Image (cartoon, helix red, strand yellow):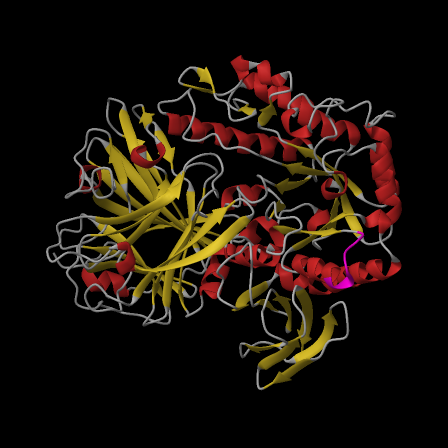
Amino acid sequence: MAVRILRDYPLGDMVARYLTDETKEHVGLVLLPADMPIQKGKEKNEKIDSLVQIKLAGDIYDEAYGLGNTMRNGESVRKLKYKRQEITEQEEAGEREEAREQEGTGEQAGSKEWAGSKKRTEIRTILEAEGEYRVIHMLSWKKGTPYVRICCKVENLGEEEIQLEMFESFSISSLSPYLEGDGHNRMALHRIRSVWSQEGRLEKLPLEDLQLEPAWDPHAVRCEKFGQVGSMPVNKFFPFAAVEDQEHHVFWGAQLAHPASWQIELYRKDDALALSGGLADRDFGHWMKGLEPREGFTSPEAIVSVAHTDSIDIFTGRLTQAALEGLEYVPEAEKQLPIIFNEYCTTWGNPSHGNICKILDAIKGKGFQYFVIDCGWYKEEGVPWDISMGDYEVSESLFPQGLDKTVEKIRESGMIPGIWFEVENVGKASRAYQMEEHLLQKDGRTLTSYFRRFWNMRDSWVEEYLSKKVIGTLQKYGFGYMKVDYNETIGIGCDGAESLGEGLRQNMEASKAFFEKVKREVPGIVLENCASGGHRLEPGFMSQMSMASFSDAHECGEIPIIAANLHRVIHPAQSQIWAVIRQNDSLQRIAYSMANTFLGRMCISGDVANLTKKQWDILENGIHFYRKIVPIIKNGQSFRYGTKEKSMRHPEGWQALLRIGGNQMAYLVIHIFAHDEGPMQIKIALPPNCPQKVLDIYSDCQETIELQNHCLYYKAQSERKALAVLLGM
């Protein structure tokens, strides 16, 4: 059947094109760059690939060889018939005005003008399996943003329970409309891998390397499904994927906002290529969910975009801009991205009133706004901090005068006090570890990792307990900042729901609800998202919190690589990067560590009470430079340069990250890693819109920077070296 345009919706520099066939029963969705309009794509052997992907237990699977590989495009999708589209437009003042689509057919419907001039627009596409279930596909766009948000809602219309075993959040198709046939040798997948303390490694793979070429007959399914299983959603891959048409310089891609198991699929049978994703399904994430008659369920949200560009950095920057919507509502204290001091790498889990006072005496008046008491404030004598969390009684030996005296000292030093909690887990040395009736179970047994167990966050008793221990502590002592840590994954799931995967999903949604309760009951609280560093850097958790620990990489040489990687998946205004300063550090090493923090939010730790004046001078110069670049961190576009990344643990060559702000300002951070030869000559071709005047240089010594014909030149004299350059008009 011929593919036809149902309707086009201009959305800023994008167009959402809804496709249908001659029967007008099936609907697909393709996003196009507004500056590359096409009325009819290149000649292809393709069918409509549905914008909704759902699988009900008992329904027939897709042909052929798909079982165990994918649940897309089975009978549950084929039953769905297009009913209508509804448009909801949100006025600036909050008044709603609705307009239903005027039905049309073929290209005439697609050619109708539609201004999309309201502040926020939602396009609802309604599909039904007659008398059985309805799916509402919801695409939302806020005026001026370079992305859309997509989710789906399913409703049981029948008289009996239905069982979902797959329900994805988004599906965009026809990802090579500008290419003939299957677009061989011109299409690539970008995805971002992640492991502990080496987060964010970009991977680019030709579709042919993934065997995503269609066969001689469009019969067999090709599908690359990847994702993560467990409660650490960034513990293998980030929930992100992008597809690139390398000939026409177009990217399509998405990020998923989900705190538990997820999947992304790149799928094809014929010339058409589809990208979809959402909750990990029954095959991949042990997920099933029952819906009673008249009951509904909404999928997690996906942030989706398309761009005409040859830069993966520009494309990912479009997705991470979605964080700015949440950053509009952060506490007032956060507006200027203030500097954090965290004592963890000073005391290593042994904070006390005495050592905190010593630190405060050293850093008072140096420009820090938050002082965070990290893990261990609760531990009993002789018991390590990482096996004793859960009871959260203030240690009398560490704080003999009470924690209130320490908090008072922090406030007297001009800083907002913060405290660490691992809210959802308990350690084996705690009394909470034995409260098995309130802990997660799997197969009827308490779910236990090496030395941690997990609160059942759906349990009302647990909510009350944590409200007393966590919220009560924040309120009692007047903490204005909470570091939320999470140091183990639940795995495939837990008891208490239709499936292990649904138990996991419910538990993590209950966790998110608890953090919302924290914000309600402690107005103005600043929340830091930490999960062994960077294991929860997904848009859902990030939207709840002001910032995140970028990684557990505290002192290693690969910190700038990780920090630069993360510009592609989280907004740098939310990326808290550590500079751990040691008393035996050279001035060059201190400058290297401080420059790392220019790639996000500055967090200092280490031997600050024992530094020399020269060491403090380098540190304070870094603080002054950071303050100058805060507006660019908050609003800018990042570009990555340097030696191709091979080993993150043993980096070689050099790296530079340029961030251009909207205020005719930019800054560049250069790191020199290991190299065998003598001085290294670095040349960086700057984008045309980059300012060309050097306003300031941060380094441990005098530096020479040359700017000629939109190129920056720097001659590096030594290894393990860093500098930063502020550029203006």
Q: Residue furthest front?
A: 676
Name the spot of residue 144 as percent of width and height, x first.
Answer: 49, 61
Name the spot of residue 329 as percent of width and height, x first.
Answer: 62, 47
For the N terminus, which image quadrant?
bottom left
For the C terminus, which image quadrant?
bottom right
Q: Main secondary structure of the magenta part?
A: loop
* Front residue of 298 and 25: 298
Residue plotted at (22% across, 67% down): 41
| Res 705 → quadrant | bottom right
Residue 376 drawn above or below residue 172: above
Residue 519 drawn above or below residue 118: above
* Front residue of 260 and 209: 209
Which residues are the magenta region? Answer: 583-588
Name the spot of residue 451 as percent of width and height, x first.
Answer: 57, 25
586 inside magenta stretch = yes
361 inside magenta stretch = no
Residue 692 drawn above or below residue 542: below
| Res 445 → quadrant | top left
| Res 53 → quadrant | top left
Residue 719 shown left or right of residue 59 in the figure: right
